[in-house]
Amino acid sequence: MVIHIKPEKIDEYKALHAAPWPAIVERIRRSNITNYSIFLKEPENLLFGYWEYVGTDFEADMAAIAADPETQRWWKLTDPCQVPLESRKQGEHWAMMDNVFHID
């Protein structure tokens, strides 16, 4: 998934993610997300997120994350740092991407 980051918010975003709240990390894990990384590409100011889903009910797990009060509080800090891509699908904040190559 990909999203723009406001240049003036890069340091704030990095600081938040250097010490994520334990409740946020635990909610992500309880929702069956593993191997989660976010990469920054400057000077284009793009964030690229990658994670692997290992659960059996993706919609329910994503709904649990979205309904979590601590996650909502976290998003109030991180969302203003981000600028969604104009090409994203309706309902997306981060634009999801199609996998065109994979090898284990």
Image (cartoon, helix red, strand yellow):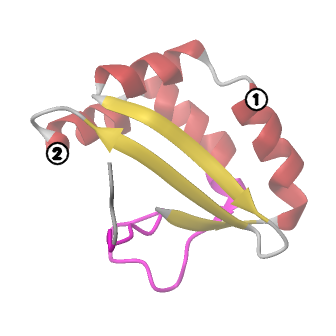
For mark 2, what is the residue? 59
Eyeballing the image, is 18 above or below 66?
above
Image location of residue 57, percent across then percent down:
11, 37
Return the residue found at the far bottom: 87
User: Would residue 93 be counted in the magenta stretch?
Assistant: yes
For label 1, the residue is 18
Secondary structure beneath dot 1 equals helix
In the rendered image of this protein, does residue 22 appear above or below residue 78? above
Q: Nearer the viewer, mark 2 or mark 1?
A: 1
Residue type at mark 2 is Glu
User: Foreground residue, 37 or 27?
Assistant: 37
Residue 18 shown left or right of residue 90 in the figure: right
In the image, is 32 to the left or to the right of 5?
Answer: left
Amino acid of disc 1: Ala
Q: Residue at x 60, y 47 (%)?
A: 38
- Local crowd at mark 1 within 10 Å, few (<14), some, or many (≥20)? few
Residue at the (32%, 76%) spot, across then down:
90
Look at the magenta stretch and give its main secondary structure.
loop
Residue 84 location, x and y as percent? 56, 71
Looking at the rendering, the stretch of residues picked out in magenta corresponds to 79-100
Taking the spot 29% from the left edge, 28% from the top edge, the residue there is: 31
Q: Who is closer to the viewer here, 7 or 67?
A: 7
Q: Horizontal and vertical percent for residue 44?
A: 77, 76
Q: Is residue 46 magenta?
A: no
Residue 30, numbered label: none
Would you call the spot at circle 2 few (<14 residues within 10 Å), some (14-19), or many (20 or more)? Answer: few
The spot of residue 77 in percent (x, y) is 68, 41
Say which of 104 and 11 sits in front.
Answer: 104
Q: Is residue 3 above or below residue 40?
A: below
Label 2, label 1: how far apart the Cα atoms are: 28 Å
